[in-house]
Amino acid sequence: MEDDRDITWDDTDLPTATRDTAQLKADMDRWGYCLIAEALPPDHIVVIRERLEEQAEAEAQLLADAFSDHVNAPDSNNQWVSMLINKGEVFHEAIDHPMVRPVLEHVLGPDYILSETSAHLTRPDNPAMALHTDQWWMPPPVMPGERDRPAGEITRATARQGPLRKADHLIAAPMVTQTMLFVSDFTEENGATRLVPGSHMTGAQPDQSVPHVVPSIAAEGPAGTIAVWEGRTWHSAGPNTSNEIRYGMPTLYAAPQMRTLKNFTLGTKSEVLAKASPRMKQLLGFKIWSGYGASGDRGATWARPGDETPGELKL
């Protein structure tokens, strides 16, 4: 017997790719994800893909850890190309896309920062990734007197799992939001990102079994589409049963209080930073937010390297 807390959907009612900002926000609220149509034109996608293919091939040959990460299945042959901020200006427009901004502000507020920007190459015969959320580390809310879950002890394996049902208790707010630029066409066959509509309302993490034990949908669409989902939404990379590589550019954004997945203030190359706009520097975490992110200058707006700030002083 169906319960009003059960999360179900009719395929005809799910988000479709649109450029209507109001609809994108409504889709995020209801389903936990949305799809931005024609975010980047075909000629720009061609340039991004050529740069990405070149970089991925070079890293595969030159870097010993090119296929090493903590997300893919053990038998995966996927490849991540990380820190795209350093690997070509062609990626920068996707990092701060004008149609993405209002959706991010709707979920995270106006002062979000960049947490990661990378590329994910899903190769033929690659298995599905386990369903997960992007804020598995969030301690669950508790009632006064209940035992808190110490935030520092939570791992992907020990995060609280639950069924695909709307929570009957308080749930945490979204603290991160992910985008995925389709650098190639995304199809069910080539491993398109899988999403569980409405799962952002569960207040729990998904079962880690592969194949997945709950239904999901493939975020399909032509190259140039951007999928956006918030940090509580269950998702994964799908299995690639085609004979082609699926090229995607995932970019993670976080509330300004958060520690980022990639350390951009340390890892951004000096030549990239020298040409970065104030807007890009803010995304990279160099702008101080309510005192957070400061590097020693009281009242400063921007963080500076330690070598440029006062050290041990004597009169």
Image (cartoon, rainbow, N blue to C red):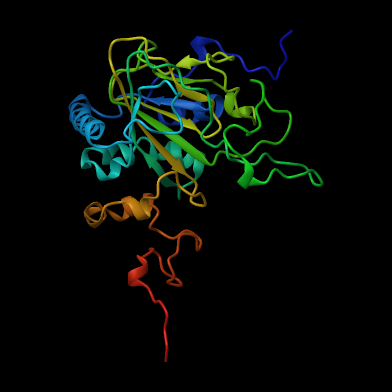
Residue nearer the viewer, 232 or 57: 57
Left or right, 311 with respect to 2, comes to left
Residue reaching furthest to the front: 64
Residue reaching furthest to the top: 1
Residue reaching furthest to the right: 145
- Residue drawn at (48%, 51%), measured in percent from left and top? 256
Residue nearer the viewer, 90 or 269: 269
Identify whether 134 is placed above or below 85: above
- Residue drawn at (51%, 61%), measured in percent from left and top? 290
Q: Is residue 97 visible?
A: no
- Residue drawn at (50%, 47%), measured in percent from left and top? 255
Left or right, 159 with respect to 128, comes to right
Give coordinates of residue 140: x percent, y percent.
Answer: 67, 39
Give coordinates of residue 43: x percent, y percent.
Answer: 17, 27
Which image quarter holds the C terminus? bottom left
Figure quadrant of residue 214: top right
Which image quarter holds the N terminus? top right
- Residue drawn at (32%, 19%), measured in percent from left and top? 123
Give coordinates of residue 54: x percent, y percent.
Answer: 19, 31
Identify whether 145 is placed above or below 164: below
Q: Is residue 154 visible?
A: yes
Total count of labels: 0
Give coordinates of residue 205: x percent, y percent.
Answer: 61, 29
